[in-house]
Image (cartoon, rainbow, N blue to C red):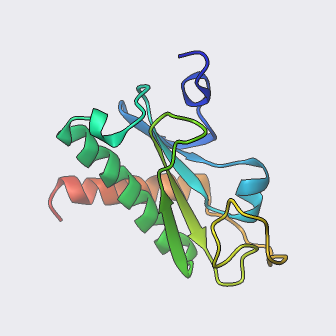
Amino acid sequence: MSDCELCASPGGEIVWQDDRCRVVRVGGAEGLAFPGFCRIVWRAHVAEMTRLDSADRRHLMSVVFATEAALRALLHPDKINLASLGNVVPHLHWHVIPRWRDDSHFPAPVWVDAKRAAPPRQGPDNAALAAAIAEILGAEASGA
């Protein structure tokens, strides 16, 4: 769908992908304010989880959970926020957002006004993040 933002573009810098979904790093102000902020985007234009069959739902959530685990291992945040809203862009995607107690919005959601300035933080290297995601998914597939 050419009028869908996530059909027309990757939605960020692609870190990892397969034939069903992609993990992208969020850029711009959001990416700077929340280093490591990723989106997992379903390739096909689907708006709701229940539109996927059970195998696709499991796969998508495995990628969401692998991304969360990889970010936790690489960044050691105080919390990870997971969100699937799709109100503005009705294309199935999940937000995986590392959070720290001293970030600009904590404990509020990242989409509200900032409460304070945040200390500078470096996000993970994309290659390291991709390798960590692939390793976690590989271990899951092998039953480890």
Residue 70's quadrant in the figure? bottom left
Q: Nearer the viewer, residue 96 or 110?
A: 110
The single residue placed furthest to the right in the displayed view is 117
Q: Residue at 28% of width from left, 39% of height from top?
A: 50
Above or below: residue 68 compared with residue 30: below
Measured as percent of width and height from the top left, residue 90 is found at 51, 34
For the image, the number of numbered tags is 0
Q: Is residue 33 left or right of residue 92?
A: right
Above or below: residue 88 compared with residue 114: above
Q: Is residue 144 left or right of residue 48?
A: left
Q: Nearer the viewer, residue 15 or 108?
A: 108
Measured as percent of width and height from the top left, residue 43 is found at 43, 30
Q: Residue at 57% of width from left, 63% of height from top?
A: 97
Q: Residue at 56% of width from left, 53% of height from top?
A: 38
Residue 144's quadrant in the figure? bottom left
Measured as percent of width and height from the top left, residue 68 is found at 44, 64
Q: Is residue 52 left or right of residue 9?
A: left
The single residue placed furthest to the left in the displayed view is 143
The single residue placed furthest to the front in the displayed view is 87
Measured as percent of width and height from the top left, residue 64 is found at 40, 54
Q: Is residue 17 left or right of residue 100?
A: left
Q: Residue at 63% of width from left, 41% of height from top?
A: 13
